Amino acid sequence: MTEVLFYCFAAVAIASAVIAISRKNAVASALWLVLMFFALAGTYVLLEAWFVAVIQILVYAGAIMVLFLFVIMLVDLKSEELAVMGAPRFRALGLLTSALFLAVAVFVVLNTRETFVAAADTWDRGGALEVESGSAAGIGHYLFHRWVLAFEVTSVLLLSGMLGAVILTKRRLT
Amino acid sequence: MNPASTSLVTQFVSSPVLAGLYDWLSLHPDHGGDLIGWAVGRLVLILVIVNVTLVMAALLVWAERRVSAWMQDRLGPNRVGPQGLLQPLADLGKFIFKEDFDPGHVNRWMYLIAPLIALVPALITFAVIPYTGVYEPDAQVEGGWAWNSWAVADVNIGVLYILAITSLAVYGLALGGWSSNSKYSLLGGVRASAQMISYELSLGLAVVSVVLISSSLHLGDIVAYQANTTWFVFQQPLAFFIFLVAAYAETNRLPFDLPEAESELVAGYHTEYSAMKFAAFFLAEYVNMFVGSALVVTLFCGGWTFFGLETAGWLAALAIFAVKTLFFCFVFIWVRWTLPRFRYDQLMRLGWSWFIPVALANVVLTATAIALDRTWVAWILPGVLVLGGLLAAWIAPGHVAVPRLAERTAPVSGEEGSR
C-alpha cells in the first residue's frame, strides 16, 4: 500500500515539476510547483514524518509560493518581455546553473547520508532523548541540541538577506 | 413520546445489529483494527461533517441577514419558511438556475478552479478540530488525559495542520482575482494575498503561546489541558485577542474586508464571477467563519468542555461545542455590523507595527511565565497596553486612534481629502 502510494506521489511530483518548468505562463508554473510541493509532502507523510510534511506545505506552498505569486501578479510580464528570457545566453546560463545544482545535489546525497546517519546514531547513544526523527519533538531535539550552531547561523543569514532587501528598496524610494 | 415507542427506541439502540455496525464503523476512536470498516466509518464521518459545515455556512448567511436586520431595526428575510429559515435554500436555487456566464477575457482554467481552491481549504480544516469527546477519568491514572477528544483525523500536529491549510486559502482569492483579467479583480486578489500573508504571522504567533503552555501541537491535548487548568482566554488574553482579530483578517470579514471592498473595487476578486461560482466564494467565506469560530473555541475557550458539564456524555460535549462555536459566529456577525472598514494603510500598520511586535513580546513573556512558573505574568502586557492606551487617550486626546476614527468618517474638505 505504502509503496503504491509512494509511486503515485513520486509520479505526480515529477510530472508537475516538469510541467512547472515548461510553462510559458509564470502563474501556471507557480501553481504546478505548488502541486509538486503537495506531492512531496505526501511522500513525507508516507515516511511518517508528519511534521516535515506539514511544514513543507506551510512554508513552501503557504508562504513562499504565495509571495512568488504575489510578485508575478504585480509584475505581470508581457510576452515580448518573456521572449527576452528565451535568448541563447539566458539558456546557456540556465543550463550551467542547473548542471551545477545537479552536481552539488548528487555530491551531497552521496557524501553526507552515511555521516549524518552515523552522527545521529552516536548522538542517540550518548544518553540522548528517545525521539522519532520526523516528529515535532524529534526535529526540535536535533535542531536545538546537535545542530543549534548551524540553526543560528542560518537564521542570521536569513536576517541579513531580509535587511539587504529592505535597504535596497528603501534606497530607491528616498 | 409514549412508552411503546420509547421501548422501541431503546430496543433499537441496544440491538446487537446497531452495536455491531457501530463497532465495525469504528466511530469510537479506539478502532478494532478492521481497516475497511474503519475507512467506511471515516468516510461516513467526513460526509456528515462536510455537510454539517456547508449547512451551517448556509444558515450563517441567513443568520447574518437576520442579525444585521435586528441591529438596524429591520426584519430581514422572514418569508421563506419559519422565521425565513429556508431562505438559504431559496438562494441556492437562485444561484443554481442563474446563467453561469464566463467572460471571454478570463484565463479559463484558473478562473474555473479558483472558487474550488477557495472552498476546499475551508472545508478540510475541520478534519482535525475535536468536535466532541468523552470524559474518561481512568485514562489520567495511566498518564494520559481524562478528556479524550474525537476528531475526523486525530493527528498529533493538528495546530500546524490548521496553520498550513489556512495559509492555502489565499490561493483561491489571489487566483480568482488574477485570472479574471480585470483591474478590480486583480487589485482585490493582490490585497487578499498581502493581507493574508501579513495576518498569518500574528495568527501563528498567537498560537505559539498556546502551544508553549500546553506543550503540545495536538488539539485534543490542548482542550484537555484547558479542562485540567483553565481556558486559555484567561491564561492568554492577549493571544486570544490577536488570534480573534487575525481570524477576521484571514476570513476577509469586516472590518478587514478590503479584498472585496465594494465602495472601491466593485466586488474585489469575485467581480467577474456569477451563479454557482460566485456562490462558492460566498460559501467559502461563511465556512471560514464557522471553522474560525470552532478554532477560537478549541484553542482558547476549552473546546467541547464546560466546567464539568461535558462529563454527561459525548452528545452533551457536542452540544457545548456547538453552542460555543455559534456564539463566536455571532460575534463575527456582530463585529461586521458594528465597525467601519479599515483603510488599507491602517490595516497594514495595525498588522505589522502593532500585532506582530506585540505578539512576539507576548511569546517571550509567556516563555518567561513558564520558566518562572507564574501564569499571571502573561497578564502584564495586555494590562500595560490597555492602561497605556487609556492614559494616552486621557493625556493627549488629539493623538490617539479614537478621534482619528471620527475624523475619518467625517466629511473631508478638498485639501484634507487629497492627503
Image (cartoon, rainbow, N blue to C red):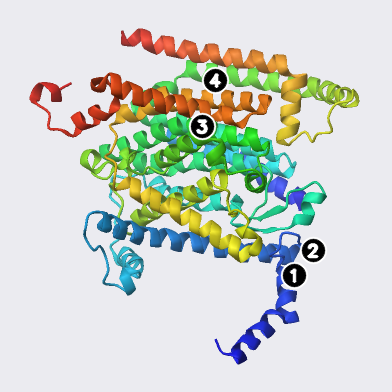
**Residue to which mark 2 is pinned:** B32
x, y percent for residue B186: 32, 37
- The answer to which of marks 3 and 4 sits earlier in the sequence is 3
Q: Is mark 2 on a helix, strand or loop?
A: loop
x, y percent for residue A149: 71, 14
Query: Which labelled disc corresponds to residue A2?
Result: none
Query: Which labelled disc corresponds to residue B23?
Result: 1
Of all chains, the one bearing label 3 is A
Query: Which labelled disc corresponds to residue A63?
Result: 3
x, y percent for residue A109: 76, 24
Q: Residue at x 34, y 41 (%)?
A: B177
Q: How far apart are marks 1 and 4 (CA)?
A: 59 Å
Q: Badges 3 and 1: C-beta atoms under 8 Å apart? A: no
Q: Mark 3 or 1, which is nearer the eye?
A: 1
Q: What element carries label 1?
A: helix
Q: In this view, does A120 lie to the left or right of B75?
A: right
Q: Distance between the residues labelled 3 and 4?
A: 26 Å
x, y percent for residue B407: 19, 29
Residue A106 is at least partly visible in this image: no
Q: Mark 3, residues whose alpha carbon is within 10 Å: few (<14), some, or many (≥20)?
A: many
Q: How far apart are marks 3 and 1 (CA)?
A: 42 Å
Q: Distance between the residues labelled 2 and 1?
A: 8 Å
Kind of residue indicated by mark 3: Ala
Kind of residue indicated by mark 1: Asp
> Residue B248 occupies which quadrant of the picture?
top left
